[in-house]
Amino acid sequence: MNWKDNLLTDDARIHALLESSRRIAVLGIKSDAEDKKPAHAVPRYLQKHGYDIIPVPVKDVGPTVLGQKPYHSVAEVPGPIDIVEVFRKPEDIGPHVDDLLAKKPRAVWFQLGIRNDAAAEQLARAGIQVVQDRCMKIELSRLTEQQGQHWPSA
């Protein structure tokens, strides 16, 4: 397989990823006190739609976020991860690539406005699917409406 096949840009492949995923680690999640910020509101939306959210904040957020224990790194999260949703500035993603590679989630999703082609290539070459510059909440809402389904399906 060509590594570029791991760069997901079309709706059908993004739809399949969202439909087949359950566990989402959120790198850069904000604390419950910052619930109006996208890095908290989007994971909360996903949680309300049946996804298991695992917080991976980059600063102290207290003992829980969205009722879940936070982890200091993606690699520390026990068990498999379907998607790592990334809320980091593009220039701040590089230092997290080794952590992401160590855990090897099925996919890494850079939120809307976040694009780092070098990191995406590294992850894709390692067999990890990558979505860039898309909001998971918007995509889930849009694709759910298109399909007339509620997600996740299982």
Image (cartoon, rainbow, N blue to C red):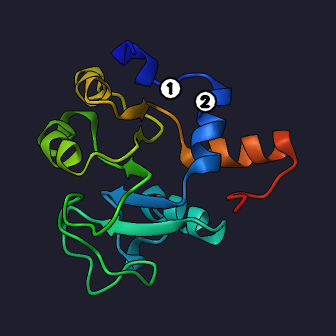
Depicted 39 relative to depicted 14: above or below:
below
Residue 84, given in percent of the width and then of the height, sits at 37, 50
Q: Quadrant of residue 29?
A: bottom left
The residue pinned by badge 2 equals: 13
Q: Which mark is residue 91?
A: none
Residue 25, given in percent of the width and then of the height, sits at 38, 60
Q: Residue shown at 34%/47% (left/top)? A: 105
Depicted 85 relative to depicted 29: above or below:
above
Q: Residue shown at 48%/38% (left/top)? A: 112
Q: Secondary structure at mark 2?
A: helix
The reply to whether the C-beta atoms of the residues labelled 1 and 2 are less than 8 Å apart is: yes
Q: Which mark is residue 8?
A: 1
Label 1 – label 2 distance at C-alpha: 6 Å
The residue under label 1 is which amino acid type? Leu
Q: Residues within 10 Å of mark 1 (few under 14, many from 20)?
A: some
Q: Residue shown at 27%/67% (left/top)? A: 77
The residue under label 2 is which amino acid type? Arg
